[in-house]
Amino acid sequence: MAKRPASFICQICGAAHTRWQGKCESCGAWNSIAEEATASDAVPATLRGGRRGRLIALESLAGTSEDAPRVRVGISEFDRVAGGGLVPGSVLLIGGDPGIGKSTLLIQASAALAEAGHRVIYVSGEEAVAQVRLRAERLGLSGAPVELAAETNVEDIVATLAEGRRPVLVVIDSIQTMWTDAVESAPGTVTQVRSSAQTLIRYAKRAGAAVILVGHVTKDGQIAGPRVVEHMVDAVLSFEGDGAHHFRILRAQKNRFGPTDEIGVFEMTGLGLAEVANPSELFLSNRDRGAPGTAVYAGMEGTRPVLVELQALVVPTSLGTPRRAVVGWDPARLSMVLAVLEARCGVKLGAHDVHLNVAGGFRITEPAADLAVAAALVSSLSGAVLPPDSVYFGEISLTGAVRPVPHSVARLKEAAKLGFVRAVAPAAKAAAKEPPETPLPVETVGSLGDIVASIAARGPRRPAREREQGYQEG
């Protein structure tokens, strides 16, 4: 019998190579290529032959369509990120760091659905049934009628799911531990993960059950395994958090049935994950009101306004190249703001180390934080304390102009609800549809130089030599 040829597959992106090499040419990862025996695709044998295709019905764009039906889990933060609930027949992929709370969240979601009268099956490939039961007991959910199993063979799992009443939710923890008889490779390889995911997706579409797949993440935060799995599923959710903080964020990165910019905020407690209805109050609970270098940013995450504290520290450097340390924001964006401050406003930061932190471990993605970051930097450099009852938001252009951002009224309403009395933001001339009434007074700024001059005027008097080295009035 002829020996089957071997192929070399990248375990990160799934690219195939004819020989082994240290670096994958597709994704650039090092030492990620492994040898795998060539096997038949994970397609049923009846479909592998060259059968003749059948005609499919074609329809026009005109017509009525209804929204996809939803099954609410009962955890409002989870339902918000999922787009209003789970869609029957959909497949969700949830990724997160080890120990972040993925299994805890899914056990709580499974218990909530099961207590509502739905059939829920939880399949663990990493833990025994006794371990899952212990976690449920710690969370006070041991009485929920959730059906448990510890299995890794996909064919056995699908055969078990087909027996009895159709389940509403199936949790697979995790997809990296699953394996199928259709391919000849070790569990956890790209071929096994892809084939196992395809089999489970076919079951979900055929049976109409919602399936949640748990995925491990790599060192850089990406979900491990071939990226094609993320394209195959209907939604990709990221469970984020920091071990030093007690809250967790569920963020949608892809969702075919809902928005991709929603977040759900949870707090890790002794009884599991508790929903946080007002995350702004949580992020601002311990802020320092009398220290320079702090500014409150009014941001938007999907349809939810979130207020967080930005902390900046500017100190003279003792290194040849100044240090730029950023936590929770885009480092490239910080470099742009520093360049605009120096080129357009005369703020010299080339001889200073700059440290920027988003308090509470929150991660900001929108450019509307530019103005708050610039205000915190200038406040730290000049020693001026920003008004603790003010919020900042606005996008900075390379010319030094401050541009308006969308959803300004929602940002102001959230700030007013938390007791803020003033906002510093650009004039909303581009948002003509928004009502002219604002929940709180707005100090409009047209350029970055306006806010720099306003903050510098509040600062303490500094020696002329120190002012020349750090801040030059323009």
Image (spheres, helix red, strand yellow):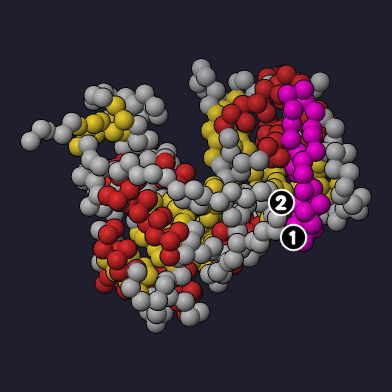
Left or right: residue 25 compared with residue 415: left
* Rendering coords of residue 317 (x, y %): 55, 24
Precedes in sequence: disc 1 or disc 2: 2
Residue 418's label in the rendered image is 1
Q: Rate crowding at label 1 as few (under 14), some (14 to 19) or many (20 or more) other CA atoms within 10 Å.
A: some
Q: In front: mark 1 or mark 2?
A: 2
Region rendered in magenta: 392-417
| Image quadrant where one finds the N terminus | top left
Q: Rate crowding at label 2 as few (under 14), some (14 to 19) or many (20 or more) other CA atoms within 10 Å.
A: few
Count of numbered circles on the image: 2
Residue pictured at 56% horizontal, 59% vertical: 82
Label 2, on which residue? 62
Observer-nearest of 441 and 158: 158
In reply to whether residue 403 is colored magenta, the answer given is: yes
Q: Amino acid at mark 2?
A: Ala
Left or right: residue 409 compared with residue 57: right
* Rendering coords of residue 191 (x, y %): 29, 42
Q: Amino acid at mark 1?
A: Leu
* Rendering coords of residue 337 (x, y %): 67, 28
Observer-nearest of 134 and 335: 134
Residue pictured at 35% horizontal, 69% vertical: 162
Say which element carries label 2.
loop
Q: Is residue 157 above or below residue 227?
A: below
Quarter where residue 123 is shown: bottom left
Q: Is residue 415 above or below residue 133?
A: above
